[in-house]
Image: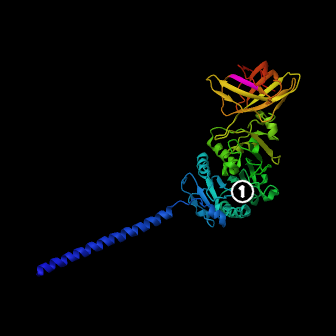
Amino acid sequence: MLKGNMQFVTCLWILLITFLRFHVLKLCFFIYLISWVKSDEEKKCPEFTDLNIGNALSGTELQVQLLLYTRENPNCSERLTEDDVAASEYLNTSKKIVFVIHGFRPTGSPPAWLGDIKELLLSSEDINLIIVDWNRGATTVNYVSAVDNCRKVAEILKNYVDQMLVNGASLYSMYMIGVSLGAHIAGFVGQKYNGKLGRITGLDPAGPLFTQEPPERRLDRTDAQFVDVIHSDTDALGFKKPLGTIDFYPNGGTDQPGCPQTVFSGLQYFKCDHQRSVFLFLSSLKRRCDIITYPCDSYFDYKRGKCVDCEAFQPMSCPVLGYYADRWKKLLIPNSSPTKAYFDTTDQDPFCMYNYLLDITTWNKSIRRGFIKVKLTDYAGNTVESEMNSEASTFQQYKRVKILTGFYQDLDKISKMSLTFSTKTVIGPKHKLRVLQMRLKSLNNPERLQLCRYDFVLMENTELTFKPIPCPEKAT
């Protein structure tokens, strides 16, 4: 009997110990899980604020965070502390400091280009890259409210910059890239340092509520040592007049190729032209081709071939668009007038157009007005075709006419070329264009031989194909 009781008690102890061990293990696992979750939260990378249309409708109070990326932490940002920038683990004030500042965010979502610009900038140069996130303040349907916040953002940025200067940074090594409203924010920061910032790039600076403002209330060429601006939507959301040391106007600065032409295309109709400036800048970082631009007084003069002599700008040649535009600043005379540069692009990345100058002398007694379409073929059989110019050329007896024509693809060794003359009229007699001399010059590769043809006739709407010959001498 006693032996049975002892066995029963022993079994109870075993069960109790097993029960306690099980719950202790559960408790330990639970404690480990809590610490693991807490540790994971601590290590979680700070991210750009992601809001939605609901936040835009209700409005957001201004909050600014600076997210630092370097080649040491390219995939996980470090949030800089406003009161103690020196505590940063990754900020190296001996290197260039690049700020990227976004603009108005009516839907609250992070900019679509944010990941690309981060990756491309860090791969291009060993820099401190700071994404300025003021999405809380920019996310609102009230554009006026976002504009009012621009000055406040600039004041906050000045606080960070002041601390960086104390810790060894120089103003000359600072570069601000501002998109839309962000361009004006960069300008306001530059004003606070009397234009001693190294560089500001304005990507289609916002036009509404800024167009009539004096220089001190918007981005201006005096806000940094070098200010380059890309204007891609001057007839709607962008700023039309020159704002920088050099102002670039792709496709004249208004309608961009590939962008919707009607409101039936939805939101893209409103933002495509405006955003094109950003994608042109991103393309310059990829270095698949240089987008060459041409200093000129107007887009009309550029299309007339009056401003395509890059040899006049030697040794630096014509300026290129985007990240490497500052290489051209060595040619600029201090306090000189702003430079406007025009160029055409294709409708998609990498956007490069390969330009040729067609120089024609005709000998018709009567004046002819019309268009000339050019087709080029290389020895491999590849063919490229130009688009007709939007403006007709005027051909007069013994007068040289320069026509700028562009192609989406570059052909090196041309075996044949075709010309088509058209007046675009559907009624009346067909005209002839009697050509005394034709000369074709590559603008992207001016070292190539120029191609000539002499004494031929173009029948209207009839393609004439021939083998060009090398010109005996350069065009004057």
Please name the amino acid that badge 1 sits on. Answer: Leu
Q: Is residue 206 visible?
A: yes
Q: Residue at x 54, y 54 (%)?
A: 73
Q: In which quadrant of the rendered view does residue 249 lie?
A: top right
Q: Residue at x 63, y 65 (%)?
A: 82
Return the x and y of residue 353 as percentages of the image width and height: 69, 36
Q: Residue furthest bottom?
A: 2
- Which residues make up the magenta segment? 416-420
Residue position for label 1: 181
The overriding secondary structure of the stretch rendered in magenta is strand
Instruction: Tell me if 302 is positioned left or right of 86 in this view.
Output: right
Quadrant where the N terminus is found in the figure:
bottom left
- The number of discs equals 1
Q: Is residue 450 visible?
A: no
Instruction: Tell me if 286 is positioned left or right of 189 in this view.
Output: left
Residue 325 lies in the magenta-colored region? no
